[in-house]
Image (cartoon, rainbow, N blue to C red):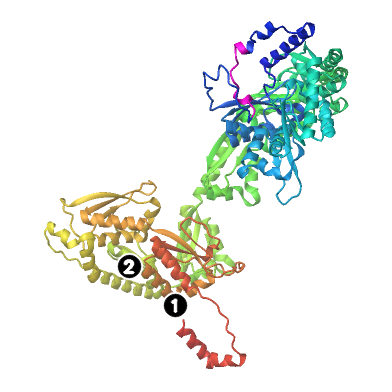
Amino acid sequence: MSSVAVLTQERFNEHRGGLLAEQSGAAGGPSGEEEALPTYKDAFPPLPEKAAVPEGTPETTNAWTTKIRPLKSSVITQVFHVPLEERKYKDINQFGEGDQAKVCVDIMHKTGAHLELSMAKDQGLSIMVSGKLDAVMKARKEIVSRLQTQASSTVAIPKEHHRYVIGKNGEKLQELELRTATKIQIPRPDDVSNQIKISGTKEGLEKAKHEILLISAEQDKRAVERVSIDKVYHPFITGASNKLVIEMMQETGARINVPPPSVNKTEIVITGEKEQVALAVAMIKKIHEEKKKNTTTIAVEVKKSQHKYVIGPKGNTLQEILEKTGVSVEIPPSDSALETVILRGEPDRLGQALTEVYAKANSYSVSMVTAPSWLHRFIIGKKGQNLAKITQQMPKVHIEFTEGEDKICLEGPTKDLQMMQVQIEAIVLDLVNRMDYTEISVDPKFHRHLIGKGGANINRIKELHKVTVRIPPDNEKSNLIRIEGDPQGVQDAKKELLELALRMENERTKDLLIEQRFHRAIIGQKGENIKEVRDKFPEVIINFPDPAQKSNVVQLRGPHHEVEKCHKFMQKMSAEMVENGYTLSVPIFKQFHKNIIGKGGSNIKKIREETNTKIDLPAENSNSEMIVITGKRPNCEAARTRILSIQKELANITELEVSIPSKLHNSLIGSKGRFVRSIMEECGGVHIHFPTEGAGIDKVTIRGPAEEVEKAKQQLLALAEEKQIKSHTAELRAKPEYHKFLIGKGGANIRKVRDSTGARIIFPMSLDNVVEDTVDVDPKHHRYFVARRGQVLRDIADEYGGVMVSFPRTGSQSHKVTLKGAKDCVEAAKRRMLEIDAQVTMECVITQRFHRSIMGPKGSRIQQITKDHNVQIKFPDREDPNAPAPAPPAVAAVVAVVQENGETDGEKCDIIVISGRKERCEAAVEALKALVPVTTEVEVPYELHRYIIGQKGSGIRKMMDEFE
């Protein structure tokens, strides 16, 4: 890899000037006056090039540097060239895409430098890198390691010199690797080897080896000599493929380090014993003087495109010409527009060298083959198979396909190129005769239907008609579909695709709303019902939503008229199902269910048939007494009457209505129906029905055996009377200005009175003292306040002087909750609500088999924890005893504790949910952990077991009671 601008215009002009000077010197020698004349360079000194000055070399002072300090740009641009033979990715069809493009994007992200790629005519890769110096150097190293083929080499220097290559904290080595874009591996101190391994490109290897040898030479205790020789004479000192310099090193025993062509240095470094160095220096100077005296130059014009053939792979052709003729050939850099090639050598050898240069330049030629661009991929073949067969016979010929152009470019040896051209022209002619293509226009919205599910439709058409079909991707937004292949197959495929598209244009999609609960009934067992509908409307596609989506939308798609007919038919089916879907629940005492069923199901079957209803009874082992009737409403009513009449015939069932003030209904029902359920169980399972809350109806219905109904009536009335007595109301008059003192700070005084007496105290709202405020409460916590018939809100009102709390309407997702009342009471209630809103929910995972032990007798332990820590604790439902038991956990105690919405590894049946303030929940979790029983094995001799158990187990029972 070589940096651009190896040979500058000024350097080239100097070469040509040197040739003229030597010619004039050979004629008569220079005069003193000519020597006194100033040169162009002396008269107009060039601006200094900072990058061109080698390290360690002091800058030359000239007319420019004394006046102007050069400004250093923060952003630099460098161009790197990767020859074709050194490219890692050589697939020309993937330029700008594929692995090479991905690598470049990755380098830009990693280094922060900007990369621009371009392809030269010789298929070499030119990379322009812009950015800060550090970023450009890092990018260069990445480019070399990832886009250029790697080679490796070793260089041997004394072991004691290795540390100078590494430098302080490895800085010198890092800087050297960055500058040469190589990887340098130095043996460890305990390794006796003195070989340093270098990996990288050929150019990088040369640079790194040169720099390492320079470092070693500087540290070498033996003699070091530096000889400055014009760069143009270096090839004569090294010889072809470095043969001459190797011979000199073998003859003298000195080490000679000549900078490679890619390094812009003229200094040759010789190290070794003093006598060996002196001998080597003499030999080098002798060669230099001879070549300077005897060589001359000629400049020839060679087309830029042919320079690569003169250079050859890795510069081998230049070395061949040097070996054969002893003439050095200088080629201008690849980024230069110059076409002039300079030959330097002895006059009698220049003619032979010139012949060689022209022979190499003309050994390759370029030709064009006309071929329609759409045929290019058929010529290349699948994965390049067809092209590979051709190139195997003539590997030196390079073939280039340009997308969108009706031509193929061939480049290579003239003889091979002609043979290749004949073969490709024959292939093109054959393809043109037997292949055809056409394009059809189809609306992009139909493209996916033409492709079909998993490409089923388009693959069938391709296989049937032996064609290739290109449907543009969605991002192109093109309506052109291209068909290529056999002429007849192309026409048949075109016809079929157009017919499909026309059919889809006439199609329409319509949504039908059917309640999801009816979907299964419409589909039927194993799809029998829906199959009949589809057979009736074969051209209509009926799509039901996924059950998990809980959607009511059924989609119909097909020809317009057929979709309309199918829509009406299914709408009628749905209406019939809705009409027949009325449900009624009838409570019937469990002991009479068998009589309603009848012998062999005769009674229930008769009722079903005569009323045309569906009647479902609860399972025998169920505690439910409800019989569910489904069908048309009048039919359901008739069925209920008949079932109730059977119950009345079998038992003395009466129905009684009791008048109890509606304001007492909630207190009679109790928390979760506790009070009313106990009355129903105590009175032989009678049914007690309270009217809907807020209806303002006082009548309560009791149904069951006459004696039990009367008993339940007496209990309800007694309980209602007790509630009324306890709900005595008294009024006390106090001036409004004293109310705040009665309430106390934060409601402290009034709370104390309420706690000691159990009475509910409500203060009137003085218009002067009434305030209205709002508090933000997360909607997900609203249900906590209004649960249990608003118990929490009633408690807040009791505690804070009758503050009125209004929550937003359900579903509005508003956070604002309004409080209205006395100012102090509103503030105290607001703080209390925020405290409740700040509650968290934690999950404590404890194996379910320990839950009963943790709860204690009648839940006493869990009640105590709830009371002590002011939290709510909810245990999971017990697992189904018939379900397969999960594998026992490795640790039987607490598995995990997580915050709300967290995840645990425990089974659902093991998770105990704790709600409250965070610190209180954490304390409750610890209290629960402490209650988890542990198992300890104690070794007791078998003969003593009976003494521990005691008579009839009395000893062991006593121990269990004493220690719980």
Q: Main secondary structure of the magenta part?
A: loop
Q: For the N terminus, which image quadrant?
A: top right
Q: Give the percent coordinates (x, y) of residue 381.
A: 80, 28
Q: Report the label total.
A: 2
Q: Is residue 705 visible?
A: no
Asked if 168 appears above or below 717 in the picture, the reply is above
Q: Give the percent coordinates (x, y) of residue 133.
A: 58, 31
Q: SS for tag 2? A: helix
Mark 2 vs 1, N-terminal side: 2
Q: Nearer the viewer, residue 85 or 792?
A: 85
Q: Which residues are magenta?
A: 42-54
Indicate left or right for 835 with 136 as reference. left
Asked if 774 appears above or below 450 in the picture, the reply is below
Q: Give the percent coordinates (x, y) of residue 576.
A: 52, 47
Mark 1, other Cα within 10 Å: few <14 / some 14–19 / many ≥20: few
Residue 887 quadrant: bottom right
Q: SS for tag 1? A: helix
Identified by mark 1, the residue type is Pro
Q: Nearer the viewer, residue 320 or 699?
A: 320
Identified by mark 2, the residue type is Leu
Residue 470 quadrant: top right
Q: Nearer the viewer, residue 62 or 860?
A: 62
Q: Give the percent coordinates (x, y) of residue 735.
A: 11, 59
Q: What is the spatial separation of the Cα atoms under label 2 and label 1, in whole angstroms?
A: 28 Å
Q: Which mark is residue 857?
A: 1
Magenta region includes residue 223: no
Mark 2, other Cα within 10 Å: few <14 / some 14–19 / many ≥20: some
Residue 713 quadrant: bottom left
User: Which residue bears the numbered disc 2?
Assistant: 668
> Viewer-nearest of labels 2 and 1?
1
